Image (spheres, rainbow, N blue to C red):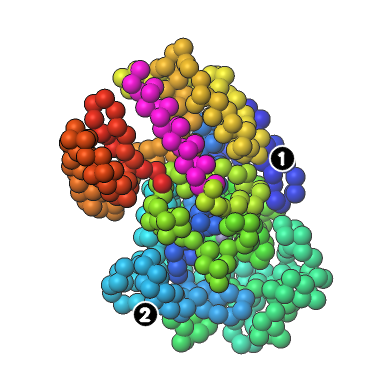
Amino acid sequence: MEIRFYNSLTKQRELFESLRLGVVSMYSCGPTVYDLAHIGNFRTFLFGDLLRRFLELVGYRVDHVMNITDVGHMTDGEEDRMTQAASRMKENKKTGRVAEGAVANPDDPYQIAEYYTQAFLSDARKLGYKIAFEYPQRVPKATDHIDGMQEMIGELIKRGHAYVAEDGVVYYSVESFPEYGRLSGNTLENLQSGAGGRVSDENQSRKRHPADFMLWKPDQHHIMKWASPWGVGYPGWHIECSVMARKLLKRDVIDIHTGGEDLIFPHHECEIAQSCGVTGSRRFANFWLHARFLFVNGEKMSKSKGTFYTARDVFEGRVTGNPVHPAVLRYELTKAHYRTNLDFSEKGLMDSGMAVRRLIEKRQSLEQLTNGQSAEVDLTHPLLAQFAAALADDLNIAEALAIVNQFARTDHRDPHEALGVWKKINSVLAIAPITEGLLDESDSGGGQDDAMRQAEEWCRELDAARRDKNYSRADELRKLIQDTGFEVRTGKEGTTIQRALM
Ligand SMILES: [Zn+2]
């Protein structure tokens, strides 16, 4: 099968071939854990997950690594994010996103980072993000790799790619790396004149070139600090990814690097400069794939408009007024092509809810027909071949979903085979039941079972009310059950319930 992806590095669609037969090494920039991840973050993560699951469908083993940024690193504006995290924590408690007492000491950056790491993993697992189940082996924390960062910085100095400035800060010298700017389309000249506005900071005068970026900053007073050959301090923003990608993927050149479009410059440009600087390779990743932004109701997410929705805002009903099943959010966040701006809306979420419902019902009916026995199918099956071919075309998800929807409407001659197809499709879409057998039920708590028991009790009351022709009481009970998060169906055998998807 010919696979083509749009490569941000070459700005064109290219034939994808892995460097090693049958194995793809892939690195995704992960979450910064100073706050809850929002749906825009998850759009990017789930695009990476879709990509991985597709590669697995067509037979690759995907060696996937994603980092957790838990260092209170600098941004270009010299603000420290970890210090700000404490105030965000207070805000999150006010809005009910974080429970009171969730972090014993909210001034301890390690506790804050650990809390948000676990919150991220929990949300990500609910959304079927595969790598979240591979924590911590494939999901390293930056703070566990400070030694590796120092080693790489030392190597970069030795190779003439980095220098210690007068004030003791270690910078990467962009002029030492002629390829700098290739990914983002920047030139050293326009960076020199400050185009983009992101290269100016108060250390300007001490740098050899305005675009030189920080690798290590000595700072005795910083909230997170480590001893180093350049004094007690902390690493720059970009070095962790170069270090963890190389350490865990064990390759100088990897197949695929993913991230959001906002990371192209400076983050990914700097990763390339560091990695190639230390290995001497011309490339760090053969393919760079970037997901575009998510909009909410046609606009960029905004703090002031309150549209920085977190995944749990959606799950817990703070966006639509009703809880939304994670499978529906996953579908919604992956249904648009990754190189288009996904527009998140309540209407879109409703449509996704219906699509997911249709697929679950399809599976249920096939399971009834087959007693749950599916036949093994592979990519020679015409429908699966079409599905895979759509995704092989730069992850054309719209076309893949059109094929899936057609499948959902078809009556199948061989339901065993159809169930096999359903399972293969679900191995990529991962919608229902999301993360079956993978999800640790402990974090949804026993409350769910209690709700189910209560709702079933109400069902029996509802049936009794109907027998007594007490329809107003029956309606009351139906409403009560629905409000608890269940769908109610009344048939010949009485009332049955099903957990609502949204
Ligand atoms: Zn990164």
Front residue of this view, candidates 354 and 341: 354
Q: How many marks?
A: 2
What range is drawn magenta here?
A: 348-369
Q: Which mark is residue 107?
A: 2
Q: Which residue is mark 1?
A: 14
Q: Tell me where residue 140 appears, x and y as whole percent.
A: 43, 58
Quadrant of the image occupied by residue 371:
top left
- The picture places residue 119, in percent across and down from the top left corner, at 38, 60
Ligand 1 closer than 8 Å to label 1 CB: no
- Label 2, residues with CA under 10 Å away: few <14, some 14-19, many ≥20: some
| Residue drawn at (25%, 34%) of the image | 495
Determine crowd level at label 1: few under 14, some 14-19, many 20+ residues with C-alpha closer than 10 A: some
The amino acid at mark 2 is Asp
Snapshot quadrant of residue 398: top right
| Badge 1 amino acid | Glu
Tell me if 34 is positioned left or right of 265 in this view: left
* Quadrant of the rendered image holding ligand 1: bottom right
SS state under label 2: loop
Describe residue 497's horizontal placement relative to residue 396 as left or right: left
**Which image quarter holds the N terminus?**
top right
Position of 20 relative to 145 (above/below): above
Mark 1 element type: strand
At x 32%, y 43%, the residue is 486
Q: Does the image show residue 161?
A: yes
Which residue: 52% across, 67% down? 306
